[in-house]
Image (cartoon, rainbow, N blue to C red):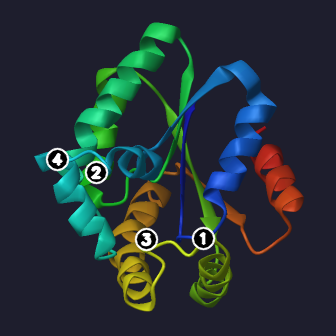
Amino acid sequence: MKDIFLLGIQWCGKGTQAKLLLKHFEWIFDYLEMWQLFRANMSNDNIIWNFCKDIVNAGELVPPFVSFGWYEIALQIVEWKNTALMTDGFPRSIEQAKFMESMMSKYNRDFVVLHYELSREKAIERIMARAKIEGRADDNEESIKVRLAAFENETLPVINYFKEKWKVITIDADNQIDDIFNETIKLLD
């Protein structure tokens, strides 16, 4: 089984689809969500996580070098366990994409990118609904604008980069959760 990278505009449902895919494929995949990793550690009071916290609270992407070590550790773990890796939220820049490719080559692994495509307008509609429910500090108007700009300027070029290499499967994320999941499974087969 190939490693899977889930990419798409914020609030397109990558995390929801990841949970469904992990349940469907059971023991085949291990899961790495970079954002979850950062969020879990940002309460620690040290130079690394204070640095990340300031950047995230401003709505910006954490610099690529912070993610590199965590990603390679995850690859070493799945190599040891002989499983595939499903990654959500990485790579988000061309620099990260090239690093990821070098790691794929180093560990002789193959991959596919699942691009959950959703319009900017629909993404904003979803985040405003979530903001009302969850009240997260990073779900404010200014940080939303910054995150959407980061997706358009940094992550969208990554998706296009991998499209040129025939590594991308695009799924319409403006559907019901089960329909998106069924389409994903169909396209992966």
Instruction: State which quadrant residue 157 falls in.
Output: bottom left
Q: Secondary structure at mark 1?
A: loop
Judge whether residue 62 can be spotted in this image. Answer: no
Work out whether 133 lies above or below 74.
Answer: below
Q: Name the amino acid, label 1.
A: Trp
Residue at the spot of label 1: 11
What's the distance in space between the residues labelled 2 and 1, CA to CA? 21 Å
Q: Position of residue 95 (x, y in %)?
A: 23, 55
Q: How many numbered marks have been drawn onto this rendered protein structure?
A: 4
What's the distance in space between the residues labelled 4 and 3, CA to CA? 27 Å
Which of label 3 and label 1 is nearer to you? 1
What number is the disc on residue 156? 3
Residue at the spot of label 2: 96
Between residue 127 and residue 156, name the one nearer to us. Answer: 127
Labels 2 and 3: the sequence-earlier one: 2
What's the distance in space between the residues labelled 2 and 3, CA to CA? 13 Å
Labels 2 and 1: the sequence-earlier one: 1
Labels 4 and 3: the sequence-earlier one: 4
x 82%, y 55%: residue:
183
Labels 4 and 1: the sequence-earlier one: 1
Q: Residue furthest left?
A: 47
Labels 2 and 4: the sequence-earlier one: 4
Q: Secondary structure at mark 2?
A: helix
Q: Position of residue 187 (x, y in %)?
A: 76, 48
